[in-house]
Image (tube, coloured by chain):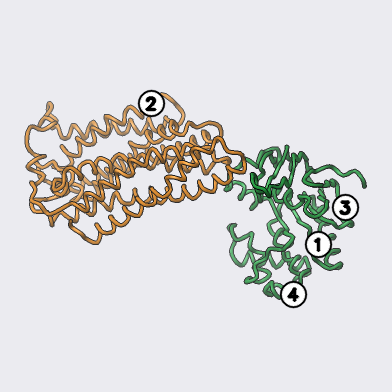
Amino acid sequence: MMLTFGAAMNLLLSVCALLLTLGVLRMAFRIFRRWNKSDDEERHELEKGFYLTFSVVMVVLGIRLFLVPLYFWNMQSFVPLVPGAMCLWGVFNALPEGAWPSLFLKIVLPAAYLSWLLLARINSSCRTNPLIRNLMALFMILTPFLLIDFGTEIYVLSQLSPVEVSCCSSAIDVGTRLVPGAIGAVSGQTLLLLILFPYSMLYVASLILSTKNRAARLNALAITIPIGILLVVTITETLTPWLLRLPFHHCPFCLFFQHPLSLVFTVLFWFGLATPWLSLATRQLGRLNGEAKEVEYRLSKTLTTYAAYAIIIAMALMLVDILIVFS
Amino acid sequence: MKIATQNLTKVYCRGKPAEVEAIRDATLGIREGDFCLLTGPSGSGKTTLLSLLALLSRPTRGKIFYENEEVSSYSDAWQTKIRKDKIGFIFQQYNLLPQFSAWENVALPNLCRQMSKAERRSQAISIMRSMGLGERVEFKVARLSGGEQQRVAIARALVTSPEFVFADEPTASVDEDTASAIITLFKNLKKEGKTLVVSTHDSSLIREATLHLKIQNGTVSRFNGS
């Protein structure tokens, strides 16, 4: 165990949030079970319980989202302590059975947490709390994932030890690359950027149109997958070697650490690409109708606008980063 | 109808030996600008009906409508918003905060509004002056007489210019002069077009009422005797 101040803080917050989650689970189940069967007076009692549960879940999910950057910051701080590690890649390989699943969870689960928080926002904007039952059911569905998320994090931070590991270049930079050196007169790396930028603009256009047009909404959803893949490939194949000025190095963890701006535009891209899925999840999981549907529509419109801005800002930052390095 | 109820029922201590049906299937309507009087013997359910109508407690069954919107099904947060924006309530026992001065008590409902302290203070003092409490602005409420405390409580209920004013026996525990001042105040509120719902034993208010409801053992009926 490598106990630093950050790791101790991370562990403490994880354990507290874990206990809070378990603490309100029973009440959430009771509200879920009784809500549709209760009369006005019992509903009022259940509603009081809901406000407590809701506040606790907000705190838990808030902690969970706050722990994502803290966790990566902690793992990064372990780099000098793990022999052979040059970046997060090495640290993750010091405990691969826990660290890699944990990384996956930290990329995917925040979308689920944000989805719950969005539904909660819709519920509190409505007059009659139409989503209480859905929120409690979703919290119970989320609980195992929360437990796994907390569990892997606690496991990684408590079990990680300074064992010797191989450096990222020994794994990432070997073998044939995904992108050919040149296609026609244009290098494969440049071509990736030339595809990513117009494709992202097309996505932004679909996002803007999606508030009015169902086909555009479906189009935006469909585009997120190829853009996501394209982004990952562009980061590893083009941006990492270019921005690090190491033509044969492709480790994104090295890039994020040495070029914090790249982390900012990656997170903005993540938000921009996750938004249509968040809206879809909110609509489907909430089974919205009436006032809730109207509120969701307004909220989704705002979020979509933010997502479009996020993608545009991310592209601008990417371009700025490239121009700074090459100027 | 400004306020209406449909089969409103409130049962206390449900399922216990001490179960009481305080209000039974009350269906009533109060129009805009009505001066509605609730009368009935002690323990008949006047305070319960008032607190149900003012959204201070939840019915066991039945519905409450404000301007044809069913507000009894609203969430706690939205009912609180309605209470904040539309309702002034005068409690029988004043419910003032003794550690605060008279003007601070009057200004309390404005704490959750976008107002500066100076604005809150000047608004509170202005309404207190109009009620003859200009000399008592800085007094702690514990130092005020019962009548003055009641007027502070009324000022607190009116400081937000609510659409609906509910008063629970406002003249029950004050002397004759204060009672007559309070009655004059209600007459003025009626002239201003406020919707008033007042529970009382005071016969002098009956003449002013545009709607007189009588409650007997939780059953509400329209009184046609006057």
The reply to whether dot 2 and dot 3 touch (C-beta < 8 Å) is: no
Quarter containing the N terminus of chain A: bottom left
Q: CA distance from mark 2 to mark 4?
A: 69 Å
The picture's colour for chain B is: green
Q: CA distance from mark 1 to mark 3?
A: 17 Å
The picture's colour for chain A is: orange
Residue designated by label 3: B208
Discs 4 and 3 lie in a common subunit: yes
Q: Position of residue A306 (x, y in %)?
A: 40, 41
Q: Residue furthest top?
A: A215
Q: Residues within 10 Å of mark 4 (few under 14, many from 20)?
A: few
Q: Position of residue A243 (x, y in %)?
A: 16, 45
In the visual, does B117 lie left or right of A268? right
Q: Residue at x 17, y 34 (%)?
A: A190
Residue designated by label 2: A218
The reply to whether dot 2 and dot 4 touch (C-beta < 8 Å) is: no
Tell me the chain of label 4.
B
